[in-house]
């Protein structure tokens, strides 16, 4: 039987200090996850599983390196997190798996079912590909050589979830242990020393044409020969985290990692084919440039919103139209502005210190140092203020419409022409731009443009 690696998120050294993770209710994510992890480890060992507990003082990168230096075929790895949200009403558990891997998706369902059977009061947020995470990808799911998953066990920012976790910690541990035991048996059902790996061959299709050379399937992930990457004119020399393996003297690359290079990756289980599409419909130079043209239709934006929040359009039915119109007037890319709205409001769920009736779709502050965030008379004016604030950062050009953004004059004009440059400016979050870019890619995938 394979071994089980388990990591408690946060607590290690990041950016020169100890990372506590989310903080709420007088506790930290690191503390709660370490306590839960220790119970899970004890329970699994009582069931005769071999468990390796990742040291708590490691950084995120150190955790991955620690597991990869010890992992072997048949092992599995789980990292447990407690999520947080601006609204205390957001609750529930979810499991993230590497996008496009149906085997790992099935493993995720085993884990989530195990927890929810023991703690049925916990809302089910489902299993999700890591492309649905805030950053658009999760290193723990992608960079670990053995089968790995990331579990959000609850929302620390929710008083209900926090009370469940603290008062029924053993039930959480038992449920997660149940899921890990089931997953481990699926990955490695037979005891004994693992033999040298033999990976099944898979077909490769590029832009509708079959490729002469085959790839391989490793832990449910499609890998393609590195020669093909060169033919696609992708330079991986500056991408050290892209997974590479050598198999029978040929170097292979994990196909899903090519999504960061504007390659669409999908899997056809019936024909055992990984499909790659490199003919990006959206101009690569526009995907992160704030002053540029949008590419989606109003209907595509509506579908994207509804798929992520079925009630999103009930209060703001014209929101896609407003973003297309207002951004078009000022020359701002409406796809970027719309996706920033999705990040800021949680797909129009709002929460925290901003209410829906404020028509503040971008977390704009007021002036004068008051506690209240900015409010606008209508949804259109709120969208207009958002667009104007983006233009203030991204351009030196004057506004077309009269100024409604209360903080327009305080922005140093033209300092952030790219999405990434909003990080640390629009928001103190240094991953802020990455989260918006990930949302744009999700929108384009939903619309069939990427």
Image: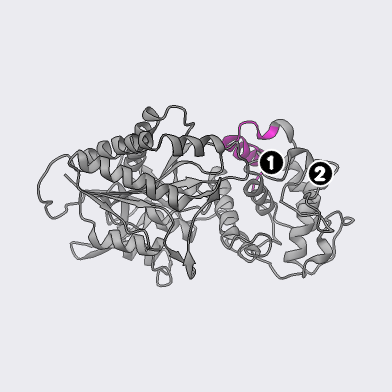
Residue at 65% x, 63% y is 422
- Which residue appears farthest toward the bottom when viewing the image? 237
Q: Is residue 227 left or right of residue 168?
A: left
Q: Residues within 10 Å of mark 1 (few under 14, many from 20)?
A: some
Question: Going by the picture, which residue comes out furthest to the right?
Answer: 402
Foreground residue among 278 and 95: 95
Instruction: Give SS at disc 2.
Output: helix
**Magenta: main secondary structure:** helix
User: What residue is pinned by disc 2?
Assistant: 380
Q: How far is mark 1 from mark 2, CA to CA?
A: 15 Å
The numbered mark, 1 or 2, whose residue comes first in the sequence reads 1
Q: Nearer the viewer's eye, disc 1 or disc 2? A: 2
- Residue range (magenta): 296-313
Quadrant where the N terminus lies?
top left
Examine the rendered structure and indicate whether residue 221 appears above or below residue 433: above
Measured along the vertical axis of the image, is residue 377 above or below residue 365? above
Outermost residue to the left:
192
Residue 127 visible in the displayed image: no
Q: Which mark is residue 298?
A: 1
Q: Which mark is residue 235?
A: none
Residue drawn at (50%, 39%), measured in percent from left and top? 162
Q: Position of residue 392 (x, y in %)?
A: 77, 64
Tell me where residue 301 sits by quadrant: top right
Task: Label 1: state its secondary structure.
Answer: helix
Where residue 215 sits in the image (x, y, percent)?
28, 54
Give the x, y percent position of residue 249. 19, 65
Magenta run includes residue 305? yes
**Closer to the camera, 430 or 18?**
18
Q: How many numbered marks are there?
A: 2
């Amino acid at each position: 039987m394979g071994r089980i690696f388990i990591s408690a998120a946060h607590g290690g050294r990041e950016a020169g200090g100890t990372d506590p993770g989310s903080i709420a209710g007088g506790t930290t994510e690191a503390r709660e996850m370490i306590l839960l992890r220790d119970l899970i480890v004890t329970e699994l060992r009582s069931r005769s599983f071999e468990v390796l507990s990742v040291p708590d003082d490691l950084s995120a990168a150190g955790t991955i390196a620690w597991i990869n230096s010890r992992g072997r075929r048949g092992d599995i790895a789980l990292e447990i997190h407690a999520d947080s949200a601006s609204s205390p009403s957001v609750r529930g558990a979810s499991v993230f798996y590497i996008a496009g891997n149906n085997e790992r998706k099935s493993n995720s369902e085993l884990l989530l079912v195990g927890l929810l059977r023991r703690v049925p009061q916990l809302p089910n947020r489902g299993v999700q590909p890591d492309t649905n995470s805030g950053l658009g990808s999760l290193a723990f799911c992608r960079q670990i050589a053995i089968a790995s998953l990331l579990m959000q066990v609850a929302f620390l920012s929710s008083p209900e979830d926090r009370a469940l976790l603290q008062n029924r910690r053993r039930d959480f541990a038992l449920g997660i242990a149940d899921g890990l035991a089931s997953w481990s048996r699926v990955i490695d059902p037979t005891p004994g020393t693992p033999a040298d790996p033999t990976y099944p061959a898979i077909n490769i299709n590029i832009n509708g044409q079959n490729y002469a050379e085959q790839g391989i399937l490793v832990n449910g992930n499609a890998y393609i020969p590195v020669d093909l990457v060169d033919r696609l004119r992708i330079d991986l020399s500056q991408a050290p985290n892209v997974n590479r393996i050598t198999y029978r003297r040929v170097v292979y690359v994990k196909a899903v990692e090519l999504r960061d290079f504007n390659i669409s990756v999908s899997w056809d289980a019936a024909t055992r084919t990984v499909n790659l599409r490199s003919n990006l419909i959206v101009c690569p130079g526009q995907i992160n440039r704030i002053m540029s043209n949008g590419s989606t239709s109003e209907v595509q934006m509506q579908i994207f919103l509804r798929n992520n929040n079925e009630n999103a359009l009930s209060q703001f039915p014209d929101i896609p139209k407003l973003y297309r119109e207002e951004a078009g007037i000022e020359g701002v890319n409406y796809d970027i502005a719309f996706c920033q709205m999705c990040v800021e409001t949680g797909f129009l769920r709002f929460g925290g210190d901003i209410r829906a009736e404020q028509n503040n779709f971008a977390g704009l502050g007021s002036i004068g140092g008051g506690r209240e965030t900015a409010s606008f008379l209508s949804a259109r004016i709120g969208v207009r203020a958002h667009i104007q604030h983006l233009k203030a950062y991204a351009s030196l050009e004057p506004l077309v419409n009269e100024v409604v953004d209360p903080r327009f004059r305080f922005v140093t004009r033209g300092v952030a022409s790219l999405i990434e440059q909003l990080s640390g400016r629009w928001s103190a979050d240094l991953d802020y731009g990455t989260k918006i870019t990930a949302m744009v890619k999700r929108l384009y995938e939903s619309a069939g443009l990427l």
